Image (cartoon, grey):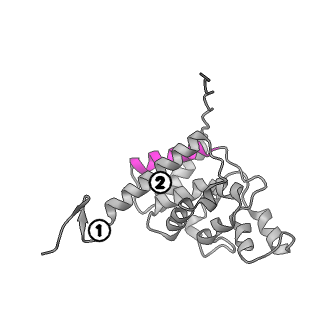
Amino acid sequence: MKHQRAEPVCTMSPKRLIKILGYLREYAQQWNKAYEEIAEQVCHAFADTKLKDGIGILEADCVDDWMDTNNPERCRYRAEDERNYWENVLFQGHRIGEIPRFNPCSSITFMDSIGRHFALPYYLLWALQDPDNMVANTLAYALENSYYTDELLLSVAQQRALLNAVGFLVEITANTYDDGYSTHGRLHLNT
């Protein structure tokens, strides 16, 4: 029997983590210890994720506008894309509509797999902040379509963080949605 080598656990520095959690608390619809635990797991799992040569959120909006790789505007936004610390993109989440080319609702569609891997933690954390917003819906759409996920090379820790975050989002969404027909999985009739 082969023994699998234990995967090293990536941990985020306390300084980075405190800053991220502070931002999440400030702009969240609601926040408690359960949200915080999921957010910490995402942060630690994706601590070392870099964009490298991938297509980031700003350049992806240029791709959406059919700009080729030599287009000066696309080159400028590619240069402006954050490449090292995904939380710097996260911190712009409350400014959708204010920043040119910052369009999280469509950008994930036009990122490459490296860009989506880099973007996954901030999309997950934005969804935790506001599970009912368009970014959360965009993330849900992307995760349920293999086109967006087939080439994501996630570590075991990242897979676990993704699974736990999505499970948590499903649970809190199910607990807050009232369709008028069911309560805790039981059908009730308005008679």
Residue at point 73% right, 78% down? Answer: 65
> In this figure, what is the number of numbered marks?
2
Q: Does the magenta stretch mainly form a helix, a strand or a loop?
A: helix
Q: Is residue 167 visible?
A: yes
Image spot of residue 137 (x, y percent): 50, 67
Query: Residue farthest to the bottom?
Result: 65
Who is closer to the viewer here, 144 or 103? Answer: 144
Query: Residue farthest to the front?
Result: 1
Determine if the magenta segment contains residue 40.
yes
Query: What's the residue type where badge 2 is placed?
Result: Val
Query: Residue farthest to the left?
Result: 191
Relative to 116, say whether 61 is above or below. below
Query: Considering the numbered disc 2 on the image, is that residue within a helix, a strand or a loop?
Result: helix
- Quarter the C terminus occupies: bottom left
Q: Is residue 26 visible?
A: no
Image spot of residue 10 (x, y percent): 62, 37
Image spot of residue 100 (x, y percent): 69, 75
Image quarter for residue 56? bottom right
Residue at point 76% right, 64% down? Answer: 80
Highlighted range, magenta? 33-47
> Badge 2: how crowded within 10 Å, few (<14), some, or many (20+)?
some
Determine if the magenta segment contains residue 45.
yes
Q: Earlier in the sequence, mark 2 or mark 1?
A: 2
What mark, if any, has residue 166 been given in the picture? 2
Relative to 103, say whether 161 is above or below. above
Query: What's the residue type where badge 1 is placed?
Result: Asp
Residue at point 63% right, 65% down? Answer: 108
Residues tagged 2 and 1 counted as in contact (Cβ below 8 A): no
Q: Which residue is mark 1?
A: 178
Image quarter for residue 172? bottom left
